[in-house]
Amino acid sequence: MEVLEHREKEFPQDLEGRLNAVLNVVNTEFKLLTMLHLDDSPADASQIHSRIRETVGENIYLPGSMNFKSYCHHTLYPIGTVAEEDIIYEEKGIIPCYRLTEAGKKYGRPIAAFTLDYIFENNIF
């Protein structure tokens, strides 16, 4: 595995930008799960899906793995909570992967954990 390119957007510095970014993290349960299943090591869509599947079990509906790539690429990467990396694997070729940024660790993960906890405690699902 070799990182070919690392891309990271800056998390907004102004209060309104930060609030908008955080609200983009919490607007679907699957985005919350995505944030909670990323860490410092790059993960591709199928790895993210597998991590979540391991947590929620087999009896819970999960969308296909490409949905998790879309959450990362179209929402979490543009707001700066997730970095995007092109990784070359000998057996697979070049695959886009995602990992948490410092802003993702500082802002994204805590708000995702808090929101998911609130959803379950209040039966809002």
Image (cartoon, rainbow, N blue to C red):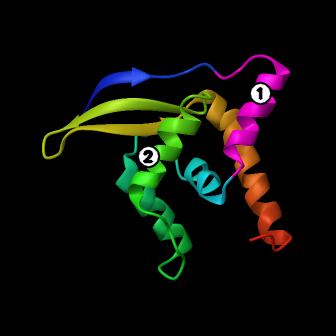
Residue found at x 75% / y 41%: 23
Residue where numbered disc 2 is placed: 69
Question: Which image quarter is the C terminus in?
Answer: bottom right
Between 109 and 78, the one nearer to me in the picture: 78
Q: Residues within 10 Å of mark 2 (few under 14, many from 20)?
A: many
Does residue 40 appear in the picture of this structure? no
Q: The residue under label 2 is which amino acid type?
A: Lys
Kind of element beneath mark 2: helix
Direction left: furthest residue: 91
Question: Which image quarter is the N terminus in?
Answer: top left
Task: Tell me which corner region of the image, top left, top right, bottom left or bottom right, holds residue 105.
Answer: top right
Q: Position of residue 36 (x, y in %)?
A: 60, 52
Q: Residues within 10 Å of mark 1 (few under 14, many from 20)?
A: some
Q: The residue under label 1 is which amino acid type?
A: Arg
Kind of element beneath mark 1: helix
The mark found on residue 121 in the picture is: none
Establish if 57 lies above or below 7: below
In reply to whether residue 110 is colored magenta, the answer given is: no
Residue found at x 58% / y 38%: 75
Establish if 94 lies above or below 116: above
Residue found at x 37% / y 46%: 44
Which residues make up the magenta segment? 11-27
Does residue 84 appear in the picture of this structure? yes
Q: Position of residue 65 (x, y in %)?
A: 40, 57
Give whichever of discs 1 and 2 has the lower sequence position.
1
Q: Position of residue 111 (x, y in %)?
A: 76, 45
Residue where numbered disc 1 is placed: 18
Task: Tell me which corner region of the image, top left, top right, bottom left or bottom right, holds residue 121.
Answer: bottom right
